[in-house]
Amino acid sequence: MTTATEPTAGKLAPLTVARAFNAPKELVFQAWTSAEHIRHWFCPAAFTIPEAEIDFRVGGKFDFCMRSPEGDLHWVRGHYVEIVPNARLVLDLTAVSNDGTALFNAYTTVLFEGVCGGTQLEVTQRYTMLHPSAGEFTRGAEQGWAQTLDRLEGEVARIAGTPPAARSVVHGMFTIERTYNATPAQVFHALTDPDAKARWFHGGDGYKELARTMDVRPGGREHLKGGWPNGLVSTFDAIYYDVIQGARIVYAYEMHLGARKISVSLATFEMKPAGSGTRLVMTEQGAYLDGYDDAGSREHGSGLLLDGLGTYLETVAR
């Protein structure tokens, strides 16, 4: 593994894009390793790649040509700077004109991280302008990358031997029980008070809250959006249907990873006296969408949240 010095002169604003994939990181990483794969996806919608030369090793070529819908050819020539299998790639790429003039450099870092049974991909490009016309080529980079990552999803599905963009629903149900040394009223408060719930209902270590609102009543809504240092952003949106003081809460919620809706669920919380404490029974019925099968991670994550609830209740029930 080696690292090159990044270009420093004539820099433009950097760009970072991220995408969650419902596939192991080994498959997503594989799509970056050969000309066969690159020709299928490394360009925006309506473009094609008629030529590519990929030598997957540090210092090896990463050259390809994009053909626009109008038939114009755009060459990018570069090499692999750093390779950490299934975790990190660094590419030094330069866009060149048809006469070989270097237009701009795109120093590209790609991170792969396994999350929620799939992969979080993050791509950061730092641009250096090498020719006055470079701004025209980089202006649409964000939209171009969004379309390119759409195509990468299709290539990952092709590698895996599954149909791209398949529509599917996987159903799941689980029940979790916890007994707390706290009254039903205290448990109900921890589930319904915005300040109290913020103490335990979050993403854990490294999680940064981006937005939170909460209105617990029939017809009320709850919204929580947050992210982690790896760029993954999750969004929880719920609507409450049944709220009985100290006894029961029922709500439906949908989850997004990035821009992708991954599930819609119905959750029920029942609070029952258990000696001097409370037995909480959580039942969730989930519909996991379009290839997202959580393989038990939702139940595991919910269990960790209820453990966090227990820790919080220990502080208020003393």
Image (cartoon, rainbow, N blue to C red):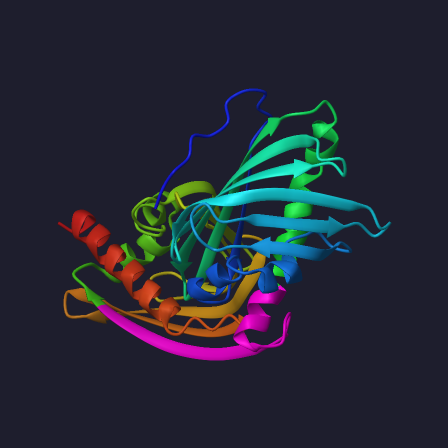
Of residues 285 and 155, which is closer to you in this image?
155
- Horizontally, residue 230 falls left or right of residue 142, namely left
Q: Residue furthest front?
A: 99
Q: Is residue 238 visible?
A: no
Q: Position of residue 198 (x, y in %)?
A: 35, 46
Against 305, residue 126 (above or below) is above
Which range is magenta?
Answer: 154-178
| Residue sitting at x 53%, y 67% | 264
Q: Residue at x 41, y 63 (%)?
A: 116
The reply, left or right, for residue 214 in relation to residue 157 is: left
Q: Position of residue 105 (x, y in %)?
A: 59, 33
Q: Quadrant of residue 276?
A: bottom left
Q: Nearer the viewer, residue 38 or 254?
A: 38
Q: Residue at x 57, y 40 (%)?
A: 93
Magenta segment: does it hold 172? yes
Q: Judge whether residue 111 is colored magenta.
A: no
In the drawing, does residue 115 fall left or right of residue 135?
Answer: left
| Residue drawn at (76%, 35%) of the image | 99
Q: Look at the picture and state if 174 lies above or below 307.
A: below
